[in-house]
Amino acid sequence: MPQADTAERLQKVLAAAGVGSRRACEDLIFRQRVTVNGRIAKLGDKVDPASAEIHVDGQRVITNTKLVYVALNKPRGVVSSLDDDKGRTELADFLGANFEQRLFHVGRLDAESEGLLLFTNDGGLAHKLMHPSYEISKTYLAEVVGPLPRTVGRALQAGVELEDGPAKVDSFRLVDAIGKTAQVEIVLHEGRKHIVRRMMDAVGHPVTRLIRTAVGPIRLGDLRPGGFRHLSAAEIAALFKAVGD
């Protein structure tokens, strides 16, 4: 049960979360399209927005205003750290003083890799996104040494042997080929260090540039290098759906 001093009417909480007007949210509750902590909500319910798990049509709605979900386009040459003791350019240099909350990055990218990194102060979601058992896919655009024979994709999908065990991609696609350089899209849910670079080394086509373009349902899009944006309510809901919440 919510604490009396923090409880608010459900339709007010939903409206504040951007679901719709209070009248529209009342209609959603009336039509039994809203659940709170696993049970169907009813008109007159009060909830604590900081702790209630609310779903509308099965999609998670974040009502805790202190939770932050951010996407950053990490530039090449930046270390995946918010507090680097060697004085190198780090992630905090781009997030700066924009957030009063302490944010954590979901996973890492090595210094020479670039692209999408997610940040949040939602420890539960971050843990699930990084845990291997949830098999959250990551999509990469890689420039590799070419020319690229057709057998490379089949070999990566079948699996290659690395020093710390076998690894395979979920999908592999040739995007472009120009002379001795090829661009490929690689999707995998592996999280081991330098996994894409090591796999491409194993098939004889080293990576010369690596960009992560998606984490699960979240895509990098046209976010400029060094830029960040808050995830939309639909994107946050998609992340929770991806981990089964």
Image (cartoon, grey):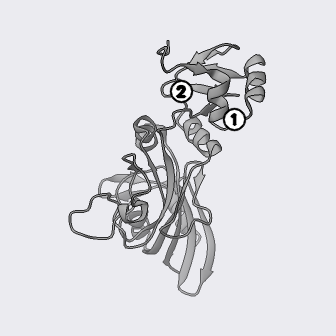
Image coordinates for residue 42, horizontal then vertical, percent: 69, 13
Front-most of 192 and 221? 221
Tell me the SS state at disc 1.
loop
Mark 2 = which residue? 49
Residue at 72% x, 20% y: name it: 29
Q: Is residue 93 left or right of residue 226?
A: left
Tell me the SS state at disc 2.
loop
Q: Which mark, residue 231?
A: none
- Above or below residue 32? Residue 192 is below
Front-most of 238 and 194? 238
Q: In the rendered image, which quarter is residue 223 located in?
A: bottom right
- Above or below residue 171? Residue 5 is above
Mark 1 = which residue? 19
Q: Is residue 148 visible?
A: no
Within 10 angstroms of label 2, few (less than 14), some, or many (20 or more) residues? many
Q: Earlier in the sequence, mark 2 or mark 1?
A: 1
**Residue at far bottom of view:** 179
Give the distance between the C-alpha atoms of the residues marked 2 and 1, in whole angstroms. 14 Å
**Residue at far left of view:** 85
Q: Amino acid at mark 1?
A: Val
Q: Amino acid at mark 2?
A: Pro
Q: Is residue 195 left or right of residue 43?
A: left
